[in-house]
Image: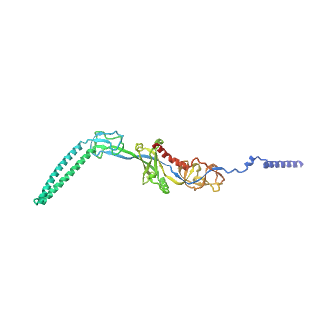
């Protein structure tokens, strides 16, 4: 019995010593393990509305200002071609010469007929003068006077007709020398010398006028409606001449001259759901060629009062994109669905879902839980997304200016 009591007392003493050790003799590190962890530190950004330039880039294709078919205005044999096929010609340059001998003969005949008509006029005038004097002395009858007057008028009209025939003959001779109506490159094929050119039918060559040049591009119906809404919401809606258009050629080269919007289609293409837009560019050196592919940039369109948030602040869930918004007491976050518009520099342009002055989490999203405490610290952005957008929009203009200089 005594041994049993001794064992019980020893066990009780050991338990008391263990309890005292764990209660009073633990290290600070062991004690800290039992305390709840501190709130995670996250980087946050406070939202502020700003005006954001929209970087609008489209695929475009160059079109000639106009294609002019050069046709013969008179029939005849082609004596000579005065240009090299495919070469550039200037307005007024001689292209072809047609045999003029037939038309020279017609001119000589018209001039002879004109001389005959003038002689007839002289005779008719003298005869009318005599009949008029006789009529005043009541020697000639009224009918004789009327016949003389009619003969005189017919002779005068014959002179005018002869002069018109002379003018027509001169024009036909002039048309035997065919000149370029516009400046530009010619087509690669044309009738050979010695061929018969039929008036108004034979196409001798085609000249493509390259200065100025059209650049056509398309935008979707939805984007057209969105841009129109943005413009109407502006304090001072933009006009066509307020929008600057720049081009990027193959290999990334910039076209040195800026253009302007010219006109847009009034209908939507039923097959593609797009609208055709045409811009116009000065092209004195012929750098832009028909059917050439280019990248078209529109500058000057600004989204007023918009939010641009860093891309890393956006997460994707089953319901779409969302961000973490810090509550008013800065001790927790809530999930906020957002509707994104487009990428702007290093950020996203937010269409709906956020308010001015709210704070969102940008860094440390993996440590955030809804309604869990956090320790927000300002997140240092390496350049505001809006500023990146402005810099991105300014690059084409700067490059174009540098090349122009």
**Where does the image place residue 200, in percent across and percent down from the top left?**
29, 47
Q: Quadrant of residue 72?
A: top left
Position of 95 with respect to 7 (left or right) is: left
Furthest toward the right, the residue is: 2
The quadrant where residue 178 appears = top left
Can residue 261 be spotted in the picture? Answer: yes
User: How many numbered marks appear?
Assistant: 0
Left or right of residue 199, residue 346 in this image: right
Q: Is residue 345 left or right of residue 165?
A: right
Depth order, front residue of 319/342: 342
Question: Is 288 drawn above or below residue 360 in the view shown?
Answer: above
Q: Residue at x 46, y 52 (%)?
A: 242
- Expressed as whole percent of the image width and height from the top left, the position of residue 231 reads 48, 55
Q: Residue at x 33, y 41 (%)?
A: 190
Using the image, determine if residue 57 lies above or below residue 139.
above
Q: Position of residue 327 (x, y in %)?
A: 63, 56
**Residue furthest left in the image:** 139
Observer-nearest residue: 272 or 393?
Answer: 393
**Horizontal arrangement in the rendering, residue 327 relative to residue 9 (left or right):** left
Could you tell me residue 136's position as x and y percent?
Answer: 12, 60
Here the colouring is rainbow
- Residue 273 in view of the camera: no
């Amino acid at each position: 019995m005594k041994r049993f009591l001794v064992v019980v007392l020893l066990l009780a003493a050991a338990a008391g010593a263990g309890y005292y050790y764990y209660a009073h003799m633990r290290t600070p590190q062991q004690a800290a393990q039992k305390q709840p962890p501190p709130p995670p530190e996250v980087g946050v950004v406070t939202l502020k509305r700003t005006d954001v330039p929209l970087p609008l880039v489209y695929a475009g294709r160059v079109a000639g200002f106009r294609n002019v078919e050069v046709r013969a205005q008179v029939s005849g044999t082609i004596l000579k071609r005065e240009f090299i096929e495919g070469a550039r010609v200037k307005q007024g340059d001689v292209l072809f010469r047609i045999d003029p001998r037939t038309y020279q003969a017609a001119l000589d005949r018209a001039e002879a007929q004109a001389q005959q008509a003038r002689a007839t006029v002289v005779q008719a005038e003298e005869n009318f003068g005599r009949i008029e004097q006789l009529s005043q002395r009541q020697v000639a009858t009224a009918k004789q006077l009327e016949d003389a007057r009619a003969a005189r008028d017919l002779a005068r009209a014959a002179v005018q007709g002869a002069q018109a025939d002379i003018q027509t003959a001169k024009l036909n001779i002039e048309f035997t020398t065919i000149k370029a109506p516009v400046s530009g490159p010619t087509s690669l094929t044309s009738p050979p010398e010695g061929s018969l050119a039929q008036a108004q039918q034979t196409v001798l060559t085609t000249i493509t006028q390259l200065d100025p040049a059209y650049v056509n591009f398309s935008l979707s119906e939805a984007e057209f409606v969105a841009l129109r809404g943005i413009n109407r919401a502006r304090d001072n809606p933009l006009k066509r001449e307020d929008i600057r258009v720049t081009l990027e050629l193959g290999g990334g080269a910039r076209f040195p001259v800026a253009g302007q919007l010219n006109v847009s289609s009034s209908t939507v293409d039923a097959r593609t759901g797009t609208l055709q837009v045409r811009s116009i560019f000065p092209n004195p050196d012929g750098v832009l060629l028909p059917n050439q592919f280019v990248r078209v940039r529109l500058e000057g369109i600004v989204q007023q009062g918009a939010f641009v948030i860093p891309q890393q602040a956006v997460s994707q869930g089953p319901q779409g994109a969302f961000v973490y918004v810090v509550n008013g007491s800065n001790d927790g976050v809530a999930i906020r669905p957002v509707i994104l518009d487009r990428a702007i520099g290093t950020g996203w342009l937010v269409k709906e879902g956020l308010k001015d002055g709210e704070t969102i989490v940008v860094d440390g999203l993996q440590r955030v839980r809804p309604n869990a405490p956090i320790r927000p610290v300002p997140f240092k952005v390496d350049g505001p997304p809006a500023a990146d957008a402005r810099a991105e929009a300014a690059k084409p203009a700067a490059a174009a200016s540098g090349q122009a200089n």
